[in-house]
Amino acid sequence: MTFDHDLDARGLLCPLPVLKAAKRLRSLGAGQVIRVQADDPAAIVDVPHYCTESGNTYLGLEEVDGAQHHFIRKSA
């Protein structure tokens, strides 16, 4: 999947991956996509939940070399 920005949150525990993603999303333009790399098992639930609550679009998850790659499209 293609993305505009990348956030490496590997090694961080809940809620830090979501908090860092939220901060980075504020600087993005509407429609841009961020990839959030995480290895905290809670991120599988937390990232999609954050997207639902914030109005951003959760595009999906890919598992790569033991890490989760979450893709989020910034809303308008």
Image (cartoon, rainbow, N blue to C red):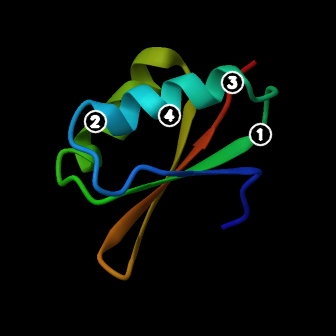
The quadrant of the picture occupied by the N terminus is bottom right
Give the labeled residue for mark 1: 32
Q: Secondary structure at mark 2?
A: helix
User: Local crowd at mark 4 within 10 Å, few (<14), some, or many (≥20)?
Assistant: many
First in sequence: mark 2 vs mark 4: 4
Give the CA separation, mark 4 to mark 3.
14 Å
Give the labeled residue for mark 3: 75
Farthest residue, direction front: 11
Q: Are marks 3 and 2 in contact (CB under 8 Å)?
A: no
Q: Secondary structure at mark 1?
A: loop
Mark closer to the observer (2, 4)? 4
- Seen from the viewer's position, the closer of residues 76 and 65 is 65
Mark closer to the observer (3, 2)? 2
Give the labeled residue for mark 4: 21
Give the CA separation, mark 3 to mark 2.
18 Å
Mark closer to the observer (4, 3)? 4
First in sequence: mark 4 vs mark 3: 4
Give the labeled residue for mark 2: 46
Image quarter of residue 73: top right
Q: Amino acid at mark 1?
A: Gln
First in sequence: mark 2 vs mark 1: 1
Give the CA separation, mark 2 to mark 4.
11 Å
Give the CA separation, mark 2 to mark 1.
20 Å
Residue 7 screen position, x and y as percent:
55, 49
Q: Residue sitting at 36 percent across and 82 percent down? A: 65
Q: Secondary structure at mark 4?
A: helix
